[in-house]
Image (spheres, grey):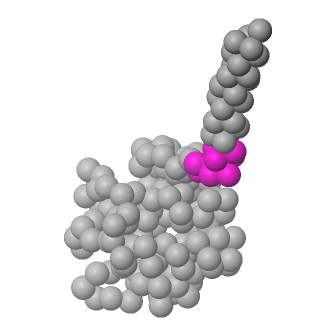
């Protein structure tokens, strides 16, 4: 009879251990959810981003909205610094809703997107007629489409300029 009590006791201990391990695993999964990678890549999660250059061109033409392309690299400190300021700037985030948005971590085959070379970060604007707006530039003569965090007000102004040019062309 003692053997049956010991057997039942050991069985209960084993079941308790298994259940305790399962509960512990569920708690750690609930406390550390893995966030999915979004197309924004941190440039503004609430904004609608396109996945490819071709899709962005198509949406720009069909919606009659200008396209803003941000070329950057995930491991570039200049890109990361600009991304942080861009994402935290409320006015830029609001104005960006009026654009078709694309951020690229690779170069496209369209040479028009690198009119003065391939560097990052680089921001170009394309109007719905699919014309690269080479006249909307940053403040550097050797990297015309480069922006730094301190240039955020210029970027905002250039975004407004891209929208105004669109209105005057209509």
Q: Residue at x 33, y 88 (%)?
A: 140
Magenta residue check for 27: yes
Q: Magenta span: helix, strand or loop, mainly?
A: helix
Is residue 26 left or right of 37 when viewed as pictured? right
In this view, the residue farthest toward the front is: 2
Q: Was residue 29 drawn as part of the magenta stretch in this picture?
A: yes
Q: Specify whether 33 is left or right of 76.
A: right
Q: Position of residue 138 (x, y in %)?
A: 40, 84
Q: How many marks?
A: 0
- Image quarter for residue 40? bottom right
On screen, residue 78 above or below 20: below
For this rendering, which residue is in front, 15 or 162?
A: 15
Above or below, comparing residue 31 to residue 81 in the picture:
above
Q: Report the residue at 52% width, 75% height from top.
A: 84
Q: Is residue 2 visible?
A: yes
Residue at 62 percent of width and 77 percent of height? 88
Q: Quadrant of the C terminus?
A: bottom right
**Coordinates of residue 149 in the picture (x, y in percent):** 47, 85
Q: Which residues are magenta?
A: 26-35
């Amino acid at each position: 009879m003692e053997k049956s009590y010991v057997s039942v006791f050991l069985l209960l201990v084993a079941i308790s251990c298994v259940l305790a391990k399962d509960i512990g695993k569920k708690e750690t999964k609930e406390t550390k959810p893995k966030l999915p990678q979004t197309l924004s890549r941190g440039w503004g999660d609430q904004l609608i981003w396109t996945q490819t250059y071709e899709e962005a061109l198509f949406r720009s033409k069909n919606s009659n909205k200008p396209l803003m392309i941000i070329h950057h690299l995930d491991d570039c400190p200049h890109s990361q610094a600009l991304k942080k300021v861009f994402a935290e700037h409320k006015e830029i985030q609001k104005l960006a809703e009026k654009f078709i948005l694309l951020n690229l971590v690779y170069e496209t085959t369209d040479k028009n997107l690198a009119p003065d070379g391939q560097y990052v970060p680089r921001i170009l604007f394309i109007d719905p007629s699919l014309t690269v707006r080479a006249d909307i530039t940053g403040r550097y003569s050797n990297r015309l489409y480069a922006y730094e965090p301190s240039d955020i007000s210029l970027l905002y102004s250039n975004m407004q300029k891209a929208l105004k040019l669109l209105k005057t062309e209509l």
